[in-house]
Image (cartoon, rainbow, N blue to C red):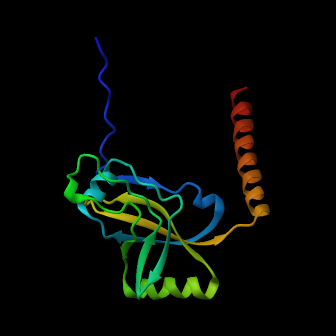
Amino acid sequence: MAQVPRKKPIISTGTAAQNRRARYDYKIGPTYEAGLVLHGPEVKSLRLGRASIAEAWAGEREGEMFLFGCHIPEYQAGSFMAKFDPVRPKKLLLHQKQIRELVGAITREGATLVPLEILFNEKGRAKVLLGLAQGKKMHDKRADIAKRDWQRDKARLMRNKGGE
């Protein structure tokens, strides 16, 4: 009997895309959840988990916040009329107070606004989790790796000692 290939599950709630490298490259400060303005085929493509935010960043343009460099590929089952640019800037929905706060932090402190993940909330709306980030130096990255290795070794030692 031939095995039928399984389709990738459709994401209704939870994480659609994750920037795993962000926590390695940056010290993440406060996080903000922002809505995303998307076209219909972009949402369908996101629900299939086909987005990449590895090289994305958020910034201000004309008093509004946008997500730049986020790649959401075209929805394959869509019609030819529903074509869109996969890397177009996507508008972020934030309160004016939050926008002023973020723009101030970016200009004053030299921080970067990095998307950590794109998710769907309980209502099925696409949201992006943004982190106010400071770049790490190489020695900070090495210290984090050493700390993580020590935690892993410590857990292994405790597990082995408890079993004896």
Q: Name the image quarter holding residue 95.
A: bottom left
Residue 13 visible, this angle: no
> Would residue 26 be found to the left or right of residue 79 on screen?
right
Q: Residue at x 74, y 53 (%)?
A: 147
In the picture as drawn, the residue positioned furthest to the right comes out as 139
Q: Is residue 115 left or right of residue 79?
A: right
Could you say where residue 109 lies in the image, as x and y percent from the top left? Answer: 63, 84
User: Residue 6 or 146: which is nearer the viewer?
Assistant: 6
Q: Position of residue 32 (x, y in %)?
A: 45, 72
Counting the numbered discs, the total is: 0
Q: Is residue 76 above or below residue 93?
A: above
**Viewer-proximal residue, 110 or 147?**
110
Quadrant the C terminus occupies: top right
**Location of residue 70 by image quarter:** bottom left
Residue positioned most to the top: 1
Residue 132 vertical placement versus 126 (above, below): below
* Camera-nearest residue between 68 and 141: 68
- On the question of residue 56 being in view, the answer is yes
Farthest residue toward the front? 80
Residue drawn at 41 percent across, 88 percent down = 63
At which x and y percent is residue 22? Answer: 58, 61
Q: Where is residue 104, by image quadrant? A: bottom right
At 28% from the left and 11% from the top, the residue drawn is: 1
Left or right of residue 43: residue 161:
right
